[in-house]
Image (spheres, rainbow, N blue to C red):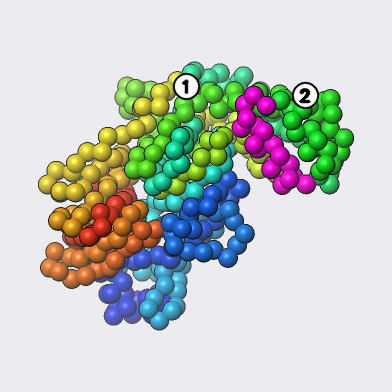
């Protein structure tokens, strides 16, 4: 069936174009900051060693290196499968529509992911136009993430500080010796960094056990690195997170020229030093990520301090500026919108046993089931598919208007491009 769909077989393609294009839910990626919740959420036991930090939900945009590396896959009833980008390239006209392709190409230019954050991600930014939304699925009590600077930042001073910190990491590795176990080093250093008041003498013995003769200058380097670690974190807003919350990472309108201009994501470091786990659905456009600082992580990853600083808003923000209001969608009971920007729109569909939620005919979009399960059908009663917690699907143009029904209080997120409004 996969090859028939690629060839444009009328029967197979007709069925595909008029129902949910469900993608496999096992597109998990190992990350050093990952946690233990994502496999349970996806109802899938991965074969790798973990930890798993993210799952690419709808990935069909080969112009982005990361999306191209982890494409979504569609599996048919006969067991055959095809990459979603290949399917859209071959049959985009039937699945996406000529107008959509004329605007965006034969692809899906959003990159929704499920994130499982147990340790701090890097301090990072994205180019103008690349804002992000985080919909919190679950979070340990007291969990936070860092978002936006809480004071005005001097770019040159910050660049010097971060560059010096990276040099100090290199110097520390030299002292430990080339054969030092950097994975063991991370296990020693990470909890010590998170304990704000612990001094470097607490981990010297552990460092000596993995290589080199760290003393004196090594202790001094570690203390300076820890001071910088906390100065960077303290320069950003600590945003409290809880299940059901929506966070919109976008430059506040008051900081854009005359209330206009192109917004971007603010500086962010998802996660928290305490290691309180967060599971979230992230909606964003594909595009580059610029790391400014990696929170003294070992082994070291690529960092481009100046490139990151150049794309960031360096003016002060406040945590409350990133918490949008969920607004009811007029005429559609059970539908709410959290973000409606020039980059994407995010809706929240909350059907229950007494109420279905209607979705009007629109251009292609994605659906993500965060809680419960739903049945979807057209207005004339034709079933178009089912989604359970942890599953995602692409809705092709041919589906038209449909209804979302649930008996267990489901939460489905609908993500679409601006032309879909």
Q: Which residue is mark 1?
A: 150
Viewer-proximal residue among 316 and 198 = 198
Q: Which quadrant would residue 13 be assigned to in this image?
A: bottom left
> Would you say 284 lies left or right of 180 here?
left
Which residue appears at 71% of the width and 25% of the height? 199
Nearest-to-viewer mark from 1 and 2 = 2
Q: Is residue 187 magenta?
A: yes
- Residue 141 is tagged as none
Q: Is residue 174 magenta?
A: no
Q: Is residue 145 visible?
A: yes
- Vertical arrangement, residue 367 with respect to residue 323, above or below: below
Which residue appears at 49% of the width and 61% of the height? 27
Contact, CB < 8 Å: mark 1 with mark 2? no
Which residue appears at 20% of the width and 66% of the height? 377
Q: Position of residue 213 (x, y in %)?
A: 87, 35
Is label 1 in a helix, a strand or a loop?
Answer: loop
Q: Which residues are magenta?
A: 181-198
Q: Which residue is mark 2?
A: 220
Q: Position of residue 381 (x, y in %)?
A: 15, 69
């Amino acid at each position: 069936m996969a090859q028939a769909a690629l060839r444009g077989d009328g029967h197979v393609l007709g069925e595909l174009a008029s129902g949910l294009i469900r993608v496999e839910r096992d597109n998990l990626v190992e990350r050093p900051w990952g946690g233990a919740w994502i496999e349970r959420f996806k109802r899938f036991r991965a074969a790798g060693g973990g930890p798993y930090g993210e799952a690419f939900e709808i990935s069909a945009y080969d112009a982005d290196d990361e999306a191209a590396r982890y494409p979504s896959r569609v599996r048919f009833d006969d067991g055959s499968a095809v990459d979603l980008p290949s399917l859209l390239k071959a049959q985009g006209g039937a699945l996406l529509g000529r107008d959509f392709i004329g605007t965006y190409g034969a692809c899906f230019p959003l990159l929704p992911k499920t994130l499982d954050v147990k340790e701090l991600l890097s301090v990072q930014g994205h180019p103008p136009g690349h804002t992000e939304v985080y919909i919190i699925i679950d979070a340990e009590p007291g969990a936070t993430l860092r978002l936006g600077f809480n004071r005005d930042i001097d770019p040159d001073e910050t660049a010097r500080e971060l560059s010096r910190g990276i040099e100090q990491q290199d110097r520390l590795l030299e002292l430990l010796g080339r054969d030092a176990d950097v994975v063991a080093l991370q296990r020693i250093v990470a909890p010590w960094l998170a304990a704000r008041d612990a001094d470097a003498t607490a981990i010297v013995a552990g460092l000596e056990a993995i290589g080199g003769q760290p003393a004196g200058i090594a202790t001094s380097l570690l203390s300076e690195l820890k001071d910088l670690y906390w100065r960077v974190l303290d320069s950003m807003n600590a945003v409290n997170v809880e299940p059901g919350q929506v966070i919109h990472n976008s430059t506040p309108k008051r900081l854009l020229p005359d209330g206009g201009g192109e917004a971007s994501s603010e500086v962010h470091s998802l996660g928290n030093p305490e290691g309180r786990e967060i599971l979230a659905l992230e909606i964003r456009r594909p595009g580059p990520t610029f790391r400014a600082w990696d929170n003294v992580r070992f082994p070291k990853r690529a960092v481009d301090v100046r490139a990151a600083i150049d794309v960031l808003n360096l003016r002060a923000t406040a945590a409350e500026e990133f918490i949008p209001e969920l607004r009811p969608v007029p005429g559609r009971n059970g539908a709410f919108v959290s973000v409606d920007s020039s980059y994407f729109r995010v809706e929240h569909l909350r059907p229950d046993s007494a109420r279905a939620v209607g979705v009007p005919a629109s251009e292609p979009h994605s659906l993500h089931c965060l809680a419960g399960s739903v049945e979807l059908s057209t207005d004339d009663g034709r079933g178009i598919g089912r989604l359970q917690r942890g599953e995602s699907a692409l809705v092709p143009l041919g589906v038209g208007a449909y209804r979302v029904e649930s008996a267990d209080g489901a939460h489905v997120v609908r993500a679409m491009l601006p032309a879909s409004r």
